[in-house]
Image (cartoon, helix red, strand yellow):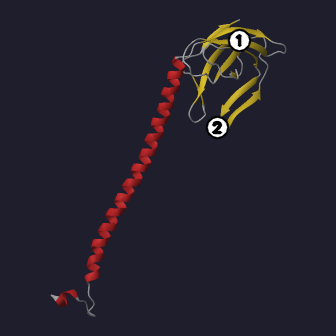
Amino acid sequence: MEKERRGKQGRDFFLRDNRKGLSEIVATLIIILLVIIAVGIIWTVVRNLLQSGADQIEISTKCNNVDIKAVSVSPAGMPGNYTVRLSRGGDAEDPVEGIMITFYNNETNSPSAVDFGSTLSALQDKTQEVNSTLVLQIGTSGVTFVNKETMGNATKITYTPYFLSSAGDVQLCPGWTRTYEF
């Protein structure tokens, strides 16, 4: 038996037999490592989905409790400027981060929504001059203001409150938009 284990030059093949067992262990460890990496990737995706869903639920809950009414809108000085007065009822305690306003007249709509520009807490009234030509654009590079064509002779507005998500993104209240004609 001893001669069967030895080769032509009398070397012992015992180490080679152990290497076969070692390669099986290495292959098993590699498979376990790949499974751990796959679980990590899947968990990251699932966690992001759960977080975005939680943000949406939080925003929707806040939006359900918002009671904002436009009290008055009137032209103010230069064309395209309007004095807007908004009032908030005694709803939830979370302050509304802002309100997007879109101006309309009989012929056209304003090119985009305009930010009312301030928070509105429960039982608070705010009157502010809004420039309908200074349009808030929310893009991937952040929030910028761009001048668009003047929206003169507006006859109505629509307004939608928004909150900021945990990541700082503007989240409009879905299905909440109200109209005020003047």
Whole-angstrom CA distance, mark 2 to mark 1, is: 31 Å
Q: Are marks 2 and 1 in contact (CB under 8 Å)?
A: no
As drawn, 165 above or below 91? below
Q: Which residue is mark 1?
A: 85
Quadrant occupied by the N terminus: bottom left
Q: Secondary structure at mark 1?
A: strand
Q: Work out whether residue 167 or residue 120 is closer to the camera in this orientation and state it.
A: 120
Residue that sits furthest to the right in the current view: 78
Residue drawn 74% across and 11% down? 154
Can you tell which quarter of the image residue 87 is in? top right
Asked whether, in this view, residue 139 is left or right of residue 3, the answer is right
Quadrant occupied by the C terminus: top right
Q: Nearer the viewer, mark 2 or mark 1?
A: 1
First in sequence, mark 2 or 1: give its number: 1
As drawn, 95 above or below 75? below
Q: Secondary structure at mark 2?
A: loop
Q: Position of residue 181 (x, y in %)?
A: 68, 6
Q: Which residue is mark 2?
A: 140
Residue drawn 57% across and 22% down? 94
Q: Work out whether residue 158 or residue 168 is closer to the camera in this orientation and state it.
A: 168
